[in-house]
Every structure is written in C-alpha cells, then in structure tokens.
Image (cartoon, rainbow, N blue to C red):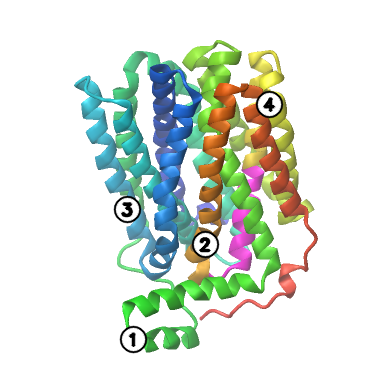
Amino acid sequence: MREILGRRPLRFVFAANVVSMFGSGMNGAAVAWYILQATHNEMALGMVVVLQTIPAMLLLPFSGVLIDREDRRRLVMWLDAIRAVIIVAVAILTFLHRVHVWQLYVMNTLVAAGFWMFWPTITALIQELTPEGQFVQSNTFLLAGVQGGWLMAGAVVGFMYNHIGLGGVLLVDVSTYVVSFLCYLAVRKGRHVVLRPQELEADLHAAESEWQKFWHELRESLHFLRDRRAVVLLGISWALFLGAMQMGTILTPSLSDRIFHAGPKGYGWLSAGWGTGAFVSVLYAPFAIATLGGRRALAFSMAILSVCQATAPVSGFLFLAILIFFCMGSARGVAGVAMNSSLMEMVPKYLMGRVQNAFNFAGTSLQLALALAVGAVSHKVSLVAGFAIVACVYGTSFVAASWPVESPSNQEIPAEN
C-alpha cells in the first residue's frame, strides 16, 4: 500500500475522491431531506431515484465506448466542471428563495447522469494507473477516499443543514468540485488513451463509418461477456447491489423521521454510521479478500447487507440502528473492493468502460422498478415492508455471488500490448 501511495497520479485521484464525495454526500442528504420536508411523501423520494435512472439508461450504452476511446482523466474533469455549473445555478435559485422541488429533480437528474459516466470512468482510470497485481490495494484506497468523504458528509450534514440550509450545502458541494477538478488536472499532462490489441485495432480501422465502429466496439464487450460466466455472475451480483443501495435515498430519511422522530440530525447519525463502517472496512478488506477470495467476500457482504436491511426498521432504538448502518457500511466497503478488484483482474483495460456499463445498465434498470415499488410500499403499506423488499434484493445478490462457477483463471482473456 505504501508503494501505491508512492505513485503521484494515484495520490491525486484518491484526494480528489475524498473531497468530491464529501460534497456529493452533503448534496444528496440535503436534497433528500428538503424534498421529504416539502412533500412528506416517500413516493417523492422514489421519483428522485427514477429521474436519476432514466438518463443513465439512455447514456450507458454509449458512454462505455467513449470511456474506452478517450483520455479518462479529461473525461472526469469535464464531468466535474459540468456538474459544478448545474449545482451552482440551483444554489443561486435557493438563495433567491425561488427554488422548487421540480428544479431539484432536474438538478439531480443531470448530476446523476454525470455520476453514472463518472464512476466507470474513474474505475477504468485507476485500473490504467495501477501496476498489475496491486488492484486490491488501489481499490482499497479508492474506497477509503470515497467513504472517507461520505463519512465526513454524514457526520456534519445533519447539523449544518439546520444552520446553512440547502443553498449553503449546495455551495459547499460546488467548492469540492473545484478542488476535485484541480486534483485531476495534476494527475498527468497530455492526452493518454489505452491501446487495444493490434488485431482488434485493425478490425476497427477497417470499419467504414463511425456508426459501424461504434457497433463493432459494443459487440466486442458483448462477445467478451458471452463466454465468461464468472464475470457475468459477478456483474449480476453487482447490478443487484447497485439497485438496492440506491434505495437508501428513499428509506433512510423516512427511518429517521417516521420511526425514530430524530429529524435531520438522526439522518446525519445514520449516514455517519454507514460512512464510518465503510471507512473502517479498508483496514480489513484486503485481508478478507485474500482469505475468502473476491467472490466469497462479495457473497458474505451481500448476506450481511440483507440481514441488516431487514432488522434496521425494527431495531427499536436509534443507537442500535446506527450500529446496524455501521455493519451495512462495512459490508458495502468490502463488497466494493472485492467487486472492483475482481473486475480489474478479469477484464482487459481496453474493455473496462464497456463491461462496467453493461452491469451498470442492468443495475439502473432495476433501480427504476425498485424506486417505484419501494416508494409506494413504504408510503402506503409500511416502512418495514419497504426495507424488506431491499433485503430480498441483497439476498438475491448473495445467491448470484455464491453460485458455483469455473475458476476465472481458467478462462482465456485476450492479451494486451
């Protein structure tokens, strides 16, 4: 791990993620709480997730090709800059007391579209910058940066929201995008594109039009997945996890408000519990993965998330719920490192953007259905039933990660130059 931190580009990437995730965590929590206060309806929070999903589904089939074609550092910088401009516009409306819920919906939709392109881009960039055999260590530090930012955000947003309001929180988020942009600017100079094997490069140049090139590149990823059952099952487990995890936007504010009557501070404590668990998990995630293997570590994490999701709304006391969220965050941390590391080991660099986006597309499609179901059930039936739906999704993810499969090491992976 000291060797990983000794690499200047990776240090800047990790620093950018700490700062950026701090702002994003505060933004997400503040917007969710504002909408819940304005509507008192979990279905309104479900609509946030639905609107975040639609642009992602439209972009994901195309953005994977772009990620594998272009300089990933420059893509990340553009995504940070565009999202900052969108958020600062809404912050100004908030200070002018002209902000409406529909404007927050639009902001979240556009920012989420950027996020669904950002995450596979940054994962592919880290794979590109990391030496072979050190993917677990680099993903551990990536998770430390991401969850460290969420931890700080969860610890302060519930308290700051009452003092600086939604507009102040949005401005904090904008400032973190500026710092993140400068960090990525310092990663390296010039334009760098990952090279593909020569025979595939020749096939691509033989295509007659840009449209043919696009479909050729898209088919490459589908052909790769077709014969690799281990990668597909891993991706299915991850897609289910993505769909379930986003339901926290709907369920966590309502858990604090309706069950524990703790308001935004309770929401802040629950978020801090999750973030602390995820941050602490970086201390033992590499050991757990080395001992159990990537797929088993992912499977155990999904089992823990399923059990905790079912017990959180019936825990009876806020401090117990915070401990449960700590366990869920810890499991999420191990799952994230295990999943990303396994993909980096099994997927060639020139295919990473497209393969990730195939699984992200499945995950966002699931989010669309889950958001509507969880929001309606939580509002019209009970919050416990909403949590139970998400627990079942995590349980299904456990099954996919546990399903027996031929060792991925026995499956041929195309050589890279």
Vertical order, 65 against 38 (above or below) = below
Determine which residue is flagged by label 2.
Answer: 127
N-term mark: 3 or 4: 3
Splitting the image into 4 quarters, where does residue 61 fall?
Answer: bottom left
- SS category of the residue bearing label 1: loop
Residue occupying image coordinates x 38% and y 89%: 206
The image shows residue 240, relative to residue 167, as above or below, that is: below
Residue at label 4?
324
Residue 314 at x, y percent in the picture: 70, 19
- First in residue order: circle 1 vs circle 2: 2
Residue farthest to the front, as pictured: 380
Q: Main secondary structure of the magenta part?
A: helix
CA distance separating discs 4 and 2: 32 Å
Q: Amino acid at mark 2?
A: Gln
Checking the image for residue 77, the label placed there is 3
Residue 167 left/right relative to 216: left
Alpha-carbon distance for marks 3 and 2?
A: 17 Å
Q: Could you give the CA–CA distance between mark 1 and mark 2, rounded to whole angstroms?
A: 31 Å
Camera-side mark, 1 or 2: 1
> Which residue is painted at 51% across and 81% down in the image?
417
Q: Which residue is mark 1?
A: 208
